């Protein structure tokens, strides 16, 4: 019960817990409740706080519990300022009546900041982001904002699109074609073609179709630059008189060159055979006396 104001300011439709609990507000409420002059007054203040909790929950429910950290901070800060001013004022009336007044003031502050956030923070139908991609490449469309995780239930991201060059004509609701419904805040378009460019839209919705947030992506897909093939370079023919240039042999010079190489190869082979034959003859001549001496010795031994 002592955390009622934080819960009231921060409550979401299910009212299970506050979105953010501020220690300063909690201590402020504790002091406020304990400041009641009698036990009966404290009991009455508890009833007032319980009723205020219900009204704050209804206020949040009417707005689907949509709130971001900045809006929550502004509502909490403004109420703390009002509460401090209330405590410094001399009170001559009923304690319970004054408690009702300050708690109702908190509800109005919460209502004001939620309405401002829904009008200016959600930016339905006016948030546009240009996206440029190359043909064959990819594009990432992401419409996530930090306050999305504060929503209860299972909100879904509904993606739709209108083909064509983006921002060239005024579009209406029925122009958009459904693309995908997903729990993920982003989609990735791969292997893009030029005919896939267009106006893409992401809508964060609940199961009943309430749109919390909407953003538009203007996707432009550009052609890849053409790959130009360089022509084959043809060398100019040699002028007359340069047919026997050693740097660019012609067909007339190639045949004699082949014949010459063949003749030189055969001559070298014949010369090599002759040299080997001479070397073998010299070796046999050198070994002949030794062979004769061995034969004569063998004959003498036999006799």
Image (cartoon, rainbow, N blue to C red):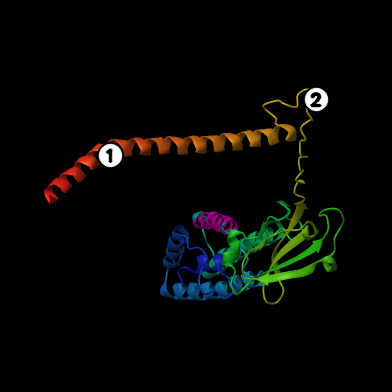
For residue 288, which numbered disc appears in the image?
Answer: 1
Q: Nearest the camera: 143 or 150?
A: 143
Q: Main secondary structure of the magenta part?
A: helix
69 within the magenta span: no
The residue pinned by badge 2 equals 239
Is 233 above or below relative to 17?
above
> The magenta stretch spans which residues?
70-87
- Where residue 228 appears, as percent x and y from the top left, is 77, 43
Q: CA distance from mark 2 to mark 1?
A: 68 Å
For residue 280, which numbered disc appears in the image?
Answer: none
Camera-side mark, 2 or 1: 1
Badge 1 density bin: few <14, some 14–19, many ≥20, Cα 10 Å: few
Residue at position x 53%, y 62% in the image: 92
Q: Earlier in the sequence, mark 2 or mark 1?
A: 2
Q: Is residue 81 visible?
A: yes
Q: Nearest the camera: 18 or 85?
A: 18
Q: Which type of secondary structure does the marked residue at label 1 adopt? A: helix
- Where residue 109 appears, as percent x and y from the top left, is 62, 60
Q: Which type of secondary structure does the marked residue at label 2 adopt? A: loop
Q: Residue 187 occupies which quadrant of the picture?
A: bottom right
- Where residue 179 appears, as percent x and y from the top left, is 74, 69
Q: Residue furthest front?
A: 303
């Amino acid at each position: 019960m002592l955390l009622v104001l934080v819960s009231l300011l921060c409550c979401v439709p299910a009212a299970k817990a506050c979105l953010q609990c501020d220690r300063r507000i909690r201590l402020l409420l504790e002091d406020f409740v304990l400041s009641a002059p009698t036990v009966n007054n404290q009991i009455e203040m508890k009833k007032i706080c319980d009723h205020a909790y219900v009204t704050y929950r209804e206020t949040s429910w009417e707005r689907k519990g949509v709130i971001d950290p900045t809006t929550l901070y502004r509502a909490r800060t403004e109420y703390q300022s009002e509460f401090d001013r209330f405590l410094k004022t001399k009170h001559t009336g009923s304690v319970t009546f004054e408690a009702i007044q300050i708690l109702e003031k908190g509800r109005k502050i919460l209502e004001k900041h939620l309405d401002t956030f829904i009008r200016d923070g959600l930016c339905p139908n006016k948030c546009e982001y240009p996206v440029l991609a190359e043909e064959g490449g990819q594009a990432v469309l992401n419409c996530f904002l930090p306050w999305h995780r504060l929503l209860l239930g299972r909100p879904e991201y509904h993606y739709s699109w209108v083909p064509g060059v983006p921002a060239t004509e005024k579009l209406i609701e029925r122009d958009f074609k459904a693309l995908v419904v997903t729990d993920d805040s982003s989609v990735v378009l791969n292997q893009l073609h030029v005919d896939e460019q267009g106006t893409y839209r992401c809508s964060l919705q609940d199961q009943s179709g309430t749109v919390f947030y909407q953003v538009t992506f203007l996707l432009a897909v550009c052609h890849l630059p053409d790959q130009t093939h360089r022509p084959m370079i043809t060398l100019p023919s040699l002028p007359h008189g340069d047919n026997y240039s050693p740097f660019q042999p012609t067909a007339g010079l190639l045949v004699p060159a082949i014949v010459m190489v063949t003749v030189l190869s055969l001559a070298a082979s014949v010369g090599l055979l002759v040299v080997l034959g001479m070397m073998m003859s010299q070796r046999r001549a050198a070994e002949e006396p030794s062979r004769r001496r061995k034969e004569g010795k063998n004959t003498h031994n036999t006799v």
